[in-house]
Amino acid sequence: MVDTGFSSFDTMVDKANRLLKDIERANGWPKERRKQSYAALRAVLHGLRDRLPVDGAAHFGAQLPILIRGIYYDGWKPAETPVKLSVEEFYQRVREEFPYAVDGGIERVVGSVLDALQLHISEGEWKHLKSLLPNSLAAVLP
């Protein structure tokens, strides 16, 4: 547990760290690869955010832990969304934002991030998220 001296901040950091640890655990990455798990989370979140309609993106963002929400909204241009992406284009977009070579390829990375996110989002919100995506991309979500 982090001790910033302010319990609300400590809680925010702990929630963000738990999500990153879930990604690391799923990929078999040691804690020393925290930059890698952060990059994976950021790339997947941005791909989802930009594919969703503006209202859906905002609704999903509101469900994220506060620090993760900042990552999600970083650089967002709502007027330029949604961006139509096929599954292959979604993977390519994540690959462009994730500069690491990893075992299992980008599909495994995306899957591990989505699995970790699902643990931190309500079941109802997860179903709502899937309903906002085209069937081919929704099928990628656990």
Image (cartoon, rainbow, N blue to C red):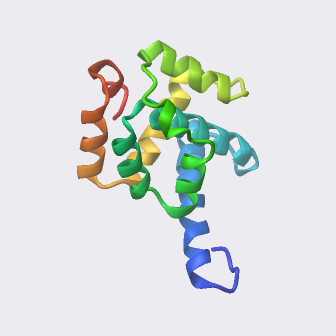
Q: 131 and 75: which one is in front? A: 75
Question: How far across and how far down the image is residue 72, in percent?
Answer: 54, 47
Q: Residue at x 62, y 47 (%)?
A: 74
Q: Residue at x 63, y 42 (%)?
A: 75
Q: Quadrant of residue 114?
A: top left
Q: Quadrant of the N terminus?
A: bottom right
Q: Residue at x 52, y 20 (%)?
A: 91
| Vertical order, 94 against 20 (above or below) | above
Can residue 93 be spotted in the picture? yes
Q: 23 and 45: which one is in front? A: 45
Residue that protrudes farthest toward the bottom in the picture: 5
Q: Quadrant of residue 106?
A: top right
Question: How far across and how far down the image is residue 124, in percent?
Answer: 23, 51
Q: Quadrant of the C terminus?
A: top left
Residue that protrudes farthest toward the right in the picture: 32
Question: How far across and how far down the image is residue 22, in percent?
Answer: 53, 49
On the rendered structure, is 49 left or right of 103? left
Residue that protrudes farthest toward the front in the picture: 79
Q: 12 and 107: which one is in front? A: 12
| Vertical order, 38 against 130 (above or below) | below
Question: How far across and how far down the image is residue 77, in percent?
Answer: 55, 38
Q: Residue at x 28, y 50 (%)?
A: 125
On the rendered structure, is 138 left or right of 110? left
| Vertical order, 134 against 38 (above or below) | above
